[in-house]
């Protein structure tokens, strides 16, 4: 039998760290990553046949459970007609229409292949459209791995910051971030008139889960308007998950540009950005801001995305929120009963775990989480067949496949796991 250990050893010989995205390597929790063989609904199985109730759900790319028949069938059918053409297709129009219908601020949309590509391009577009250079981002918000936005990014970058003693990644020249200003989350900065754009996760979900304080997003809108800067919502996680119309619909703030990814690809490689038509029309071929992609608007990806969006109607969002509430309340009680100091914040269908006592409003607060205890909890849960993301700054992604029985099972295993953690390391 192929084991996780075998594959991990072979992987590390030919892939740096054995993985194609750093957090998957378990560096912040220790141990050997499980290699997934297949998945269905709320479950994944590794190559050894071990079953996990999965709260990772591809970091939010999956909303209706793994291998949903409607998505699988859509991709299968699309593949039979060819996997990429280099010419426009009908489904690109349908997906752009669907996004525009759900998210009114997106008068025009362009498809790309990842969330990173969406944010990088939105940034260039904002700079091109305003003829300004400065970008303002918030500490602890993650916008993919583009040079200009990597500083103080939360997620797995949190540990890079520590390792190098400098914010962000090695290999990013100082000039690449010379026009990036990083400010604390949940405080409206006073902007200068050289600011092209402010980019924000409207609900921060890469430093654990941090809700926007009342007035924060509204305040950003007012401040951007005051100096003529564009407001960019990075809704790569929140888009089509928090609400039919994303965080902007939930909080009633209209950004100039919005970035998408994850859910709109139904598990395939998709990103998109959209916004005001007058801004979007600065893109080539209409305008001078260049962006292109061999696989942009790919037939398989648009088929999967359309199928995924077809599964999330208003009733689905109500169900997601009920599931997340059951999960968050259950986990909070399980941790409290075990004497584990933890908070389980929830915003709509998103749930976080913060291993500390205080409420969190920004990155400094987020980083007070007890990372070592997260590692213990992670492994205690994994041993009991529940997969959380292997990093203390990731969130949980309950989806449409997590029915009440699954949630209750996860909560009961979490109670047992938490008790084993406090028995070992009383907090
Ligand atoms: C995941 C993520 C990205 C990057 O998307 P990729 O598809 O991984 O490149 C950007 N912004 C946010 C908020 C994300 O969570």
Image (spheres, helix red, strand yellow):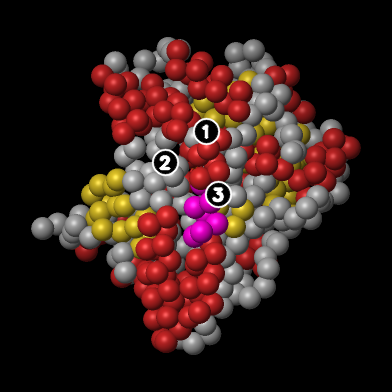
* Mark 2 / mark 3, whichever is N-terminal: 2
Q: In this view, does 48 lie to the left or right of 23?
A: left
Which span of residues is magenta-colored? 320-327
Which residue is label 3 attached to?
321
Numbered circle sitting on residue 64 = 2
Residue at horizontal 29 percent and vertical 21 percent from the top: 77
Classify 351 as above or below 165: above
Which residue is label 1 attached to?
313
Provide residue 111's location: percent of width, then percent of height: 52, 25
CB within 8 Å, label 2 to label 1:
no
Kind of element beneath mark 2 = loop
Could you tell me how far apart the alpha carbons at marks 3 and 1 are, in whole angstroms?
Answer: 13 Å
Could you tell me how far apart the alpha carbons at marks 2 and 1 are, in whole angstroms?
Answer: 11 Å
Residue lying furthest right in this view?
226
For the stretch drawn in magenta, the main secondary structure is: helix
* Mark 2 / mark 1, whichever is N-terminal: 2
| Residue nearest the observer in this picture, 237 or 179 | 237
Q: Is residue 157 left or right of residue 35?
A: right
Provide residue 2's location: percent of width, then percent of height: 14, 57
The answer to which image quadrant residue 234 occupies is: top right
Kind of element beneath mark 1 = loop
Q: Which of marks 2 and 1 is in front?
A: 1
């Amino acid at each position: 039998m192929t084991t996780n250990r075998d594959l991990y050893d072979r992987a590390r010989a030919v892939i740096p760290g054995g993985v194609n995205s750093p957090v998957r390597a378990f560096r912040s929790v220790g141990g050997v990553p499980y290699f997934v063989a297949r998945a269905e609904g709320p479950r994944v199985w590794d190559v050894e046949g071990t079953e996990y109730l999965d709260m990772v759900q591809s970091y939010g790319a999956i909303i209706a459970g793994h291998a949903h028949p409607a998505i699988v069938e859509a991709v299968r059918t699309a593949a039979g007609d060819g996997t990429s053409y280099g010419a426009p297709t009908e489904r690109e129009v349908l997906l752009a229409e669907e996004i525009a219908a759900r998210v009114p601020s997106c008068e025009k949309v362009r498809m790309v292949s990842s969330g990173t590509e969406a944010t990088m391009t939105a940034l260039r577009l904002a700079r091109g459209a305003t003829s300004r250079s400065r970008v303002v981002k918030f500490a602890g918000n993650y916008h993919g791995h583009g040079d200009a936005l990597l500083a103080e990014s939360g997620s797995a970058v949190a540990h890079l910051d520590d390792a190098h003693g400098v914010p962000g990644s090695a290999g990013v020249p100082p000039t690449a971030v010379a026009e990036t200003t990083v400010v604390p989350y949940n405080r409206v900065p006073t902007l200068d008139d050289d600011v092209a754009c402010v980019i924000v996760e409207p609900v921060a979900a890469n430093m654990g889960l941090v809700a926007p304080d009342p007035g924060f997003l509204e305040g950003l809108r007012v401040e951007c308007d005051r100096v003529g800067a564009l407001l960019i919502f990075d809704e790569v996680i929140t888009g089509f998950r928090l609400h039919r119309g994303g965080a902007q619909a939930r909080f009633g703030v209209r950004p100039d540009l919005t970035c998408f990814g994850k859910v709109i690809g139904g598990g395939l490689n998709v990103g998109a950005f959209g916004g005001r038509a007058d801004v979007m029309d600065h893109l080539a071929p209409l305008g001078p801001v260049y962006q292109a992609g061999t696989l942009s608007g790919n037939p398989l990806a648009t088929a999967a995305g359309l199928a995924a969006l077809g599964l999330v109607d208003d009733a689905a969002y109500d169900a997601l929120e009920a599931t997340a509430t059951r999960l968050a309340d259950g986990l909070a009680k399980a941790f409290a009963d075990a004497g584990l100091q933890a908070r389980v914040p929830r915003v709509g269908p998103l749930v976080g775990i913060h291993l500390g006592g205080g409420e969190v409003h920004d990155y400094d607060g987020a980083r007070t989480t007890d990372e070592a205890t997260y590692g213990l909890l992670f492994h205690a849960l994994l041993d009991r067949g529940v997969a959380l993301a292997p990093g203390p700054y990731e969130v949980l992604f309950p989806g449409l496949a997590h029915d009440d029985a699954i949630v209750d099972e996860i909560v009961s295993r979490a109670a047992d796991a938490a008790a084993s953690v406090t028995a070992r390391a009383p907090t």
